[in-house]
Each structure stands twice: as structure tokens, then as C-alpha cells.
Amino acid sequence: MTTEVGSEPEVKKEPEKSSEEAQAEQQQQLAEQPAEPSESEPSAAAEPQPTPTDSTKPDNTDQQENAEAEPSSPPPSSGQKKEKGISRFLPPWLKRQKSHSQVEPKESSSPTDTPNQTLTEKQEEEEKEEEEAEAAEEQVGKAPEEAEKRQEEAGPKEEGEAVSPVVEQPAETKEVKAEVKEEVKAEEVQAENNSVGSVETQPAKEEKEGTSAEKKGEKGGEEVQESSVLSPLKLGKKMKIVVCHVTLLDGTQFPCEVEKRAKGQYLFFKVCEHLNLLEKDYFGLSFKDNADQRCWLDPTKEIKRQIRNSQWQFAFNVKFYPPDPSQLTEDITRYLLCLQLRQDVSSGRLPCSFVTHALLGSYTLQAELGDYDPEEQRLDSIADFQFAPSQTKELEEKVVELHKSHRGMTPAQADVQFLENAKKLSMYGVDLHHAKDSEGVDIMLGVCANGLLIYKDRLRINRFAWPKILKISYKRSNFYIKIRPGEAEQFESTVGFKLPNHRAAKRVWKVCVEHHTFFRLTNPEQPTKSKFLTLGSKFRYSGRTQAQTRQASTLIDRPAPYFERTSSKRISRSLDGAPVISVSDHGHMLDSARTPGSGENGHDPALELSSDSKSPQVEEEAEPGKGAVAGAVPAELPFETGTDGADSSETKSAEDKLNSEINGQPEVIEVVEETVVIEEVVKAAKPKSSAPEVSVTVASSATEEVPEVKEEEEKSASSDSESEEEAEFHPQSPSDSAHHIQEEPEEEQEQSQKAPPTNAEPQQDAEPETTDKVEAVVNQQKEEDEKTPGEETVVAPEDAPNGHHVQDGEEALTSLGAVAEEEEELEPCVVNGDASHAETERVPQVICCSEPPVVKTEMVTISDTFAAQKTEIATKEVPIVHTETKTITYEAAQLDGTGDGEPGVLMTAQTITSESLCTTTTTHITKTLKGGLSETRIEKRIVITGDSDIDHDQALAQAIKEAKEQHPDMSVTRVVVHKETELAEDDD
Amino acid sequence: MQADFGRFTHAVIRAAPDSLAAQALRSGPAELQVDMEAVRREEEQYVSVLEKTLGLRVVRLEADEELPDCVFVEDPAVVCGNTALITRPGAPSRRKETEALKTALANLDLNIVEMTDESATLDGGDVLFTGREFFVGLSKRTNRRGAEILADTFQDYAVSTVPVLDTLHLKSFCSMAGPGLIAIGSSEAAQKALKTMQQMSDHKYDKLTVPDDLAANCIYMNLPDKGHVLLHCTPEAFPESAKVFEKLKDHMLIPVHNDEKRKVDGCLTCCSVLINKPSKV
């Protein structure tokens, strides 16, 4: 564990976890192994994951063998995640091995692990608790000193290790609680990663392959247990079971036991099974977050991580309202949709006129009660039905009058009629979100099947159909859409909206991404596989699209399932009623048939396993009440050392601070709030979010000729961070992909550019060495308030080359200047957060690990700049829409104190943005010619948006790992982790 | 909702007062002489078409000399389904026109909703109902608050706002010429407004472009025995535009004279409130 800085709480937790986890992990692993092969086979996507896991395993393998640490993490999910992270760090050959070993990840991992063993031992406990990769990261983070030792020892170790020290530092600075949180976060992150990488990617494949995967998934929960049973190791482990209470559409409660680390899809599957629902892609599970906002349970992520400290209370709801309900295949699906709409209508969420209220009500009566019976139905009994938000006698009379006219109509027919009328309502299927426009005027954003609607009061003031939208992104609490230029327009325009907080922005963004994919696309977009700079994965809708679900529905071959309609009257009166819908035996059959592709059910052993590992974390999370903290993730743009004179000075000061801090723990408080900047890169627009969460900026510059110097690599065993401050989504319509295509190509180009240089240098191997070189300066602000997770800035400046800032002018400038300011300002006061935004309370801790400038580059601690920006922003509250034009200022880069005096010639500049569930990665690739040397500089900004638990260290480590993996030839010159927390919101 | 678009059983009209000639509001030159005799003739033809040709039950309201514009009953009331929104006309001199109309509509058993908010103004001429949704022109006569109240009144439908800058009303250059068919003028302002409407709508509309903006104001009905019916401008008034309408083969085309009232900004739709009151079962 973390021997050094008192991470007592962690230790305690860890031991527990370790034992339990270890067992569980082992079990899981065992289970996973069998499962994995099958998965891998069906889906190509799955394959990549296993490999990564292997890689991770190698690091931690020792533990695994011992059954102590690493194994603890649920093999499938965690393993995968970790693997990814680790794999990145690992040199290519290791990776390959891993890949080969995929079938038997553990084995392969174990051998590789040996090098890390020393490290791992220390952290074993932790590792056990968390995933392997996480553990490694955590270890590093916890004890910087240890990390150093490790580095020495582990010299051979991978880059990841090197990074780890950085991570450790932050951890140290943080209090014990913080550490725990971090761990949790890390775990989450990993989970997300897993989900993102594997799950998301898989869906399409799975679907294609279909049944096999689904079947597995369907078996889900059971399988998990089975798997555990199967693995001897697991026997020892105790599954932590939590009872989820799901409110069904008929108002009844469905209690469902799930393993504490189960993913959302597992619970969702159980509910659908209970309901005997096959056409389930239109539905979802929702829960209320701390702010009482309804959130959709992400099927690919652990439940625990999503609900945080909230109750295990969920609601089964319609998520995608089918525009034409008559196309649904089964009556039971229509029935459930009717139930949802009755709720929507009676609650006022779906406004309609008196006449429509009456008409819908009359169909409800016909469906629930059958033909009008004058003897049975009197007005006083009708009053038990809730037809409208404010129900009048007049309405009831009208309902009854209309009911009489429906004589002879079957319940199913009545439902059809109900839906035919409901679907015409203008607000049918419109998911509303409060927001402000660029002028601060209150508006509503309505996400629907066709696009995005803008309402001001009741009036529709604008509408953006999906085909018109080129990009959807959010940054901090701002939400942006980039609009395709009109006929007469030459330029794309970006429209921004201000949401109440970061979470809300993220929520809208996600809903948009999901709706676009579901309704507009034929197949879900594959999350971009980690191309170069892709840190983390992109969030994408992982389920089936409407087209797919319709197609799947055609395969439904079962007699219409019997289901009992619950009289809505009963429902309204009391919830005592038994579940209305009887589950039929058909359920399994159906499920298998229907959802072949998506592993929604969470049957995947991996998922289950992961859940196990996470369980301990859950406990931890609860303790600190950290929920609020995680929320803020400042997206920081990667600032590279290259700076203008002013910047340099600022940076220097920052550096000084950092340096001083290094030993001690310098406190750099960065204000959570960051400027919202949308960067439009020449080709691809990259949103740089200065979100309130953790942003990891990794700048790697590869100088082809001078690769040696740059070998420094920071290894942070940071887990993937889930947080997404910023996210972009480029809606691609099947038909019109012009823009998208363009963007993608760009990315590819970038990759291509980057790739060539990287190949030459095997820096990864060297990493251990590099680590030595790299001096990590950790500035940690010890925040008295544990609650507010500060921002951590880890800067590993290596080369002056950093000067290539392709950053958007605004961002770069602001960041640099701001950072400095922030440090000064921020340090003293945690108050910054108070500024306008909900983010007020954030007490960001900034940990700056600056590695001594390796070769050319001087270490510039950018932390200040970030902070400054943030502070400024906070005060001013950034206007909603920022459209930044990325100006590639190569010159500025040169200006940097770094050795390069010569201005380079900018050859190319690219910006790529990728999104994962919680992570937004913006990659800037610039290629410059300096004095005959071509230098490729890649700046990656990773914004992790997490609600409460983000392990910054892990995030950092992961970012570094990924960067290394992706660009083996390149050196990591600088890493900045910025953490912003929006406590206020969460608390609210 | 959409199935019976254009189906009407009743029409409310109001006789033109003599004061119209001199006092009616007008955006055109004040010198333009209005021949009240011609106005009467037009009125006669209008009613005749509605009542005799089309078989609607026409409710005639008495003219009020105090209200020179009272013939334009479209503006004080918006009827959709069985709900009538009594508006608050943008021109203060017309506010009292609502009283008689409210009474008449109430007598037809419509649900009456009154726009009492004193910050709201809305002219029915700015309200385009397509059968699927409303477009409300934000003009000199209609403000956002008025549109909001309309949205609150007809909650089943989306209500989108369309800026109207150059003309008196939204329907000064457009109207419905059929289900999903918008007749639109050719002016830049009209075309721009159409684009706005198309962007704001989830529905696809066909457009019938006519050379003259004013000619784009026509009355579409879908009557049980007549099918598609279109009251439109006369060839004498707008020859080119009339040719466009004449190409509508599926419609029963009825040219209607409106030259005199046009002098005081009167359009075809302005002169009646059409109501669909299905006979009770």
C-alpha cells in the first residue's frame, strides 16, 4: 500500500479489499478467462481489450499469482481497463505478448508483471482493491518517493511507473480520504474505459455477431455468479449484493438483487426480463442524482459509480420515444409506452389541450376498464384516474363521454389509438433541459428524435435538425452545437448554451449523442479506437439504433406475451399492487433472440467481475461523501512550455512554486472554473474544455533527430479518468457524412504524421530511465477541505519544442496567463469557486509534477496559467459560446525559454477530439520544421468529467501511458493535470 | 388533428362599417380612396361563396362604426379545434373588436380563452396554422408574449415564431393552400420567412410560390362534398399569381374579389373566422 504518506484510511480499506478483492478478482479472472475467449471471438472489439489486460497484468502479474493484489480486480472489466492503460505504457512487444495471451490474460500478465512486482508489492493491497492498472497508478501517486525508488528498482519498468510518481504525489497531498476517493475514481475511470473501449466498440460487432454475445450477456447476472462459482478462487470471495428498487411504469416496485459492482445493463436486463420485454432498446433506467436531476443509468458502467451516494432507487422509463409507435412489434411494448405517456401527460411533462386530455383519458379507460359500463363506472370512480395535471370534473365528464364511443375496442387497440394521438403532440418525445442562451436568457433545450429544439417559454424559437448539426460538444457548463453552413453561408457557426452546471451540460450532450445515434444512424458509431492520441475512449451510444431494434424486432417470434394491465387507477392510489406484468418463460428466449449484439444485459463475466472489484470502492466512496468533489473536472488545455515572454515569466514563477512544492507539497489552487473555449482547429474542431474536472494534458514532442534526449517519460499509473469536461460528438448522418468524413480524415492524418516519427524511437522501453530524468514537481495544495478536490497539475516539461502551441489563441493565452494568476490567487483562497458558477466551492488542489526539463525543454509549470484562467473565468463567467479559432502559433512555441531560438515552420497542424463516457481528449498535432529538423508535436488535452470520483493520478498516468503507447517514438514533454471540482453543485 | 385540416362548418364574418373608408388603418397611402360600394359588393360575393357555394353556416355580426376595422374578424380571434383564443389586437383602436366576436364564438359553444395579459398583443393575421403546428409572426401587431399565450392555449401544437419585418402580418405573404402546402409570395422577406418556418418545423411542407406576396393569401378548405377548395385572388388583380393557382388541378378554385379591402390591408383570410363544429353524435 502507500506506506508513506498516511493513507491510513486507504490502507485499512485496502486490506479489506485486498483480501476480498483478491479472492474476487481471482474468481473473476477465472471466470473471465473462459468468458473472454468467447467474447473475443464474437467481437473484434473485444479482442483489443483482452490484450490490454494482458499487458496490465504483466505489470501486476505478481500480485495476480499471489492472488493478492491485481487479481482482485475483476478480471474482465477491470482487467481490460487496466490492460489498456498498462498496455499503453508497455513497450510494443509486451503489448503484443499480451495480445497473444489474451485468451489467458492472467498467465501472460504474470510474467510481465514481475518487473513491477516490487512496486506492486507495496501497493498490493491497493491494487487488489482496484484494478491492476489502477493499483499501479495509485501506488505511484501515493508515494512519490516510493515511486522514485520504484523507478530505480524498476528501472526496467515501464513508463507508466515513471508516471506513477506524479500520481503519487497528488495522492500524498491529498488526505487519506482523498486517496480513497481517487482510488475509487480510478476504478471508475477504468470501468468507464472498459465500458467505453470494449463495450461501446463491441456493440456493433456484437450485434452483428449477435446472438452469441447477447446470450452471454443475457445470462448475465447468473453467469456472473456461475463464473464465480466456477473459479475456485472466487469461492472464497463474497459477493456483495445490493437490492435495487426499480419503479416500474405501472407504479409498482421491482426489487432486484444485484452484485454491488454490477453494471447498469445487468439491472436493466433483469427488469426487462421481469417485464417480459423484448423491444427494450427504447427504454432505460433512470435515477435521481444528488441534485435530484434525472439521470440515465449507463448500461456500460457500474451502477455504483453512477449513483454515487444516492439510493439504489431506479425508475424504468422510456428513453427513446418511437416517433411511430405503430411500428412497434409487440403490444406489450406499446403498453409500456402508454404507461410512460400517461405519466408524462398526468405530470404535465407532456402538455396537451383539454380535448386531448379527454381523448387520451378515454382511451386509457377503454384499455384499462374495457367497454363503458354505466353501472360500474361512475364519475367518482373515474376520479381515481389521473388524466391531467389539474383534473376537473368537466374533464372527467368529457373522458367518460368519449369512453362511451370506444365500445368494442380491445385494450391493445385502445393503446394504439392512445399512441396515435399522443405522438402528434408537439412535445412528444422531447427531452427538455433548462439552459440559457448566449445572452443569458432562459431557454429550454429540447432533444428529440429529429434534432435539437430551442424553446423560450412555450415558444419554439429555433430548431436544429440532426443533419444540420456538425458537432455536439460541451465544455464545462456550456453546451455547443456546430451548425452546418446554410446555402448562403460560407462558414460553420457554433451555437452555445449555458447550462446550470457542468453535469447538466454533460447530460444534455449525452442525451444528444444518444438520440442522434438512435434515431439518425443505422448503426451506432464505433468509438474511435485509440488512434494515436486518443486518450480514453469516447462516449457513444452503445445500444442499438432504432433501425437495428426494428430489424431485431422483426425476428421476434413468440406468441404475444400475456401481460396484465394494471388499472391506472390502482396505480395512482397505491403502489401496493403486484407487478402488473407477469414475466413469461419466453423472456429468456426473446432476450436471446433480440439482443444478440449488445451485451446490455451485463452478462459478461467481465462486467460482473469488475463489479466485484469495485465494490470495496463503493464503500470508500460513501464514506467521504466525495460525490460532489468528483464533479468538477477542469479541462485544461495542454500548455506546452513554449510561451510568450509574459507567459514564460508566469510559468517560471509557477515553476518555482512547483519546485518548492516538490519536496513539500506546494499548494497550487486552481480554480475549478475554466474558460469555456471551443477550439476550432483548422480541420477538426477540438473543444478545449476548461471544465471543472480533471484535465490531463500530455504534450509529446518527437524530434526525429533528437529522440534520445526526449526519452523522458513520465509514467503515471493513473487509471483512466472518466471525467469528461469537454466532449465532442460529431453526428454523422448516414447520408451526409461530408463533414464528418473530413474530420476523421484529419485525425487519421494526424495519426499518420505522428506515427512515423514515433516509430523510430523506442522510448517506451527507455521510460524507466527517463523517469529518472524527469523530475516530478508536485505541487499539491493541501486543501484543508478534503471535500474539494483540487486541481492537480502535473507538468512534465521536457523540451522546448513544446513551443508549438497549436492551441487556440484564446486558450493558450488564457491558460498561460491565467495559470500564473491562479496559482497566486488561488493558493490563498479556496474561495474562487464561489464565483458565479455552481463550481464555487471547489478547492482545487493542484499538483504539479514537473519533470526537470530533460533535454531541451525547460520545465515550465503551467499550473498557474491554468489556475489563472480558471479564476478569471470564474469571476467573469465565461460567455456561453466561445468559438475559438485555433491559431497555430508556432512562433510562440519558439519563444519559449526552451533552447529553440529558431522559429519553426509550421508544416501541419491538426486537432483531434475524441470523447468517451467521461473523457474528452483533444489532440493537437503540429508538425514543424526547425532548422531542417522536423518536429512533430502532439498536444493532448484530456478532460475527465467525473462526478465525484476521479483519480487524477490515475488519469494522469493513463494519459501518459496512452500517449506513450500511441507514440512510442515520441517523448512526453509535459503533463499537466488540472483538477476542478464543483462542489457547490454536487452539494446542492 | 391533421385529418380534418381545412374542414369547416361555420364562418363568422362582420359587416364593414362606413367608417372603414376614412378611418380604417392602412399601411398604404392614405389618399387611396376606398369605395364603400365596392366593399359591399366584395362582401356579398365573399359571403355568397361561403354560404351558397360551399354550404357553410355563416354567422354575420353587425358592423360597428366605432370600429372601422371590424370587418377583419380574423385578427381578434384565433380558432383551432373547439377552442377560441380571443386576442389582444396590436392596434389599440381595434381592441374592442373582440367583444362581439367573443360573444359570437361563445354562442357556438367554443371554449373561449381570453388574452388578458396587457403586455401581450396578437393579431390573428400573424397566426398561420398548418394543421400540424402554428407559426406566429412577430410583427408590429404581435409580440412574443402574445405568441406565448397562444402556445399556452393550444398546447397540442408546436408554436414557432417567425420574424415579420416588412409587412403588416405574417399572412400578408403566405397562407395554407392545402394540407402541407404553403402558398408563399416571392419577395425576399416572404422567402426568408418560409425558410425560417421550414427550419423550425419537424414537418415537411410543400410550397406554392406565387409572384405576388398579397396573392399568397388564400383560403383553403377541405369540405365533405367539395374536396379541396381554394379561395384565391382574381386574375384581374394578380394575373400571374392567378395562373399559379389555376395549376392546382385537384382543387376547386374560386377566385374572390378583394380589391377594395386590400386598400386597407384586407386580405382574403382577414374577413372570416372559420370554425369546424362537428355535429354532435
Image: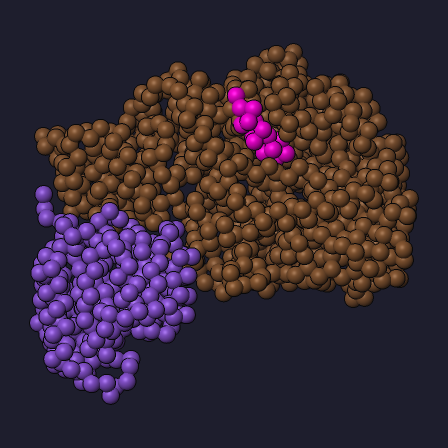
Chain colours: A brown, B purple
Quadrant assignment, res A771: top right
Q: Is A791 placed above or below B245 here?
A: above
Q: Nearer the viewer, residue A799 or B172?
A: B172
Q: How many numbered badges does the structure rendering display?
A: 0
Residue A927's spot in the image, x, y percent? Answer: 79, 53
For the N terminus of chain A, give its image quadrant. Answer: top right
From the viewer's perspective, is A954 left or right of A609? right
From the viewer's perspective, is A282 left or right of A238? left
Residue at left offset 27%, top offset 57%: B248
Residue A862's spot in the image, x, y percent? Answer: 76, 55
Q: Which residues are magenta?
A: A195-211
Residue at left offset 16%, top offset 55%: B8
Q: Is B76 placed above or below B56 here?
A: below
Q: Nearer the viewer, residue A821 or A490?
A: A490
Q: Is A341 placed above or below A23 here?
A: below
Q: Is residue A872 magenta?
A: no
Query: What main secondary structure does the magenta stretch of the protein show?
Result: helix
Q: Is residue B280 visible?
A: yes
Quadrant assignment, res B216: bottom left
Residue at left offset 73%, top offset 41%: A532
Q: Is residue A767 visible?
A: no
From the viewer's perspective, is A436 left or right of A676? left
Q: Is A283 placed above or below A897 here?
A: above
Q: Nearer the viewer, residue B231 or A82?
A: B231
Residue A442's spot in the image, x, y percent? Answer: 44, 60
Residue at left offset 25%, top offset 80%: B26
From the viewer's perspective, is B185 left or right of A982? left
Residue B91's spot in the image, x, y percent? Answer: 25, 76
